[in-house]
Image (cartoon, rainbow, N blue to C red):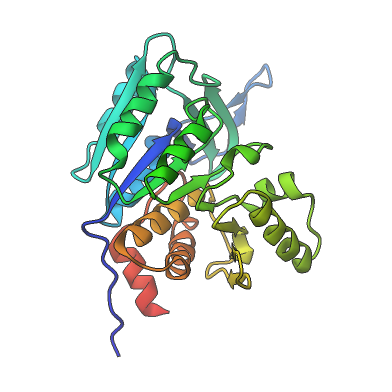
Amino acid sequence: MKKKLIDFTNTFVLVVGDIILDCYWSSKSNYLLSEQLTPILLINQVKKQPGGAANVAKNIAEIGGSSKIIGFIGMDHEGLILKKLMTHIRIYCDFIAIKKNKTITKIRILSEEKQLMRVDFQEKYISKKIDVLYKKIVNSLSYFKILVLSDYAKGTLVHIKKIINLAKKMSIPILIDPKGIDFKKYSGASLLTPNLAEFEKIVGKCYKENEILQRGMKLLSELNLSALLVTRSKHGMTLFQSHKKPIHFPAIEKIASDVTGAGDTVIAIIATSLAKGYSLEEACFYANVGASIVIKKIGTETLTINELNGVLNYH
């Protein structure tokens, strides 16, 4: 029997967060050593991709949803590249350009698909235009069903509590991809999606499955969250909801080529699914399948709705 295809048309998600340009410099050959013992790498390919919150918006568009993205970029060449990369019929970019900041750029240097080094430009966005950002969010929220806050600790979401309170007043679900060691600022969110390493920074190292389950329920309660999803790489993902037993989604793909951006894919699929009217359990199931597709790709990649439906129908 043919399974029903999922369809994310007419879904509207607002994405706010740290906008990053991800660059990949790739070499097919191993590096050679010169007379000075300096590593030399012949770069065969340079690839540029939207990263951070921009990757979330791109993921939403590629699976058929529509999004608006609000965030900072620098007034520089990298900012212009990002704008071009985000030219998509289903993405509306509302970027705030800052004169004295560079666009946050990460360059990953790869040899034979293995990462040798990462070079970062600009630590954080430091701007006096935080009020402009907030006004843009206020003016946009009523047009969207879901809010995604993509926190890469790069300075865009310094007043995240204010944004959460605003969305809650408007009864708009708030999905957050968190960063750092202070999760209290995310209190009251609808869903938090840390990976296992981020989760353990908050609750301590978990050596047994039972410890993850107990501490997950405790964190859910402490932060007054509606739900918590811990993504666990080859061990899948675990969903915690108050007054319900945790639900575990086993990984479909055990071997990852590159997990960069997989968290962006997860939160993008969940947001789009919820905007379409799917339950949170269904949304997490689709996100788990989506993550299994992108981890097989090198770099900050997205997946298409056809790829997602193809794997869903196969399983």
Q: Along the horizontal axis of the image, is 114 left or right of 164?
A: right
* Quarter of the rendering occupied by the C terminus: bottom left
| Residue 32: percent from left, percent from top | 60, 30
The residue sitting at the front extreme is: 169
| Residue 300: percent from left, percent from top | 44, 44
> What residue is at 42 percent from the left and 51 percent from the top?
173
The residue sitting at the bottom extreme is: 1
- Residue 223 seen anywhere in this rendered image of the structure: yes
Is the residue 228 above or below the residue 28 in the image? Answer: below
> What residue is at 46 percent from the left and 44 percent from the top?
299
Depth order, front residue of 268/243: 243
| Residue 38: percent from left, percent from top | 64, 21
The residue sitting at the left extreme is: 89
* Quarter of the rendering occupied by the N terminus: bottom left
Count of residue discs = 0
| Residue 215: percent from left, percent from top | 74, 58
> What residue is at 75 percent from the left and 50 percent from the top?
203
Q: Along the horizontal axis of the image, is 15 left or right of 4?
A: right
Q: Along the horizontal axis of the image, is 237 left or right of 134?
A: right
Depth order, front residue of 18/252: 18
Depth order, front residue of 227/295: 227
> What residue is at 51 percent from the left and 28 percent from the top?
159
Is the residue 168 above or below the residue 131 in the image? Answer: below
- Residue 51 seen anywhere in this rendered image of the structure: no
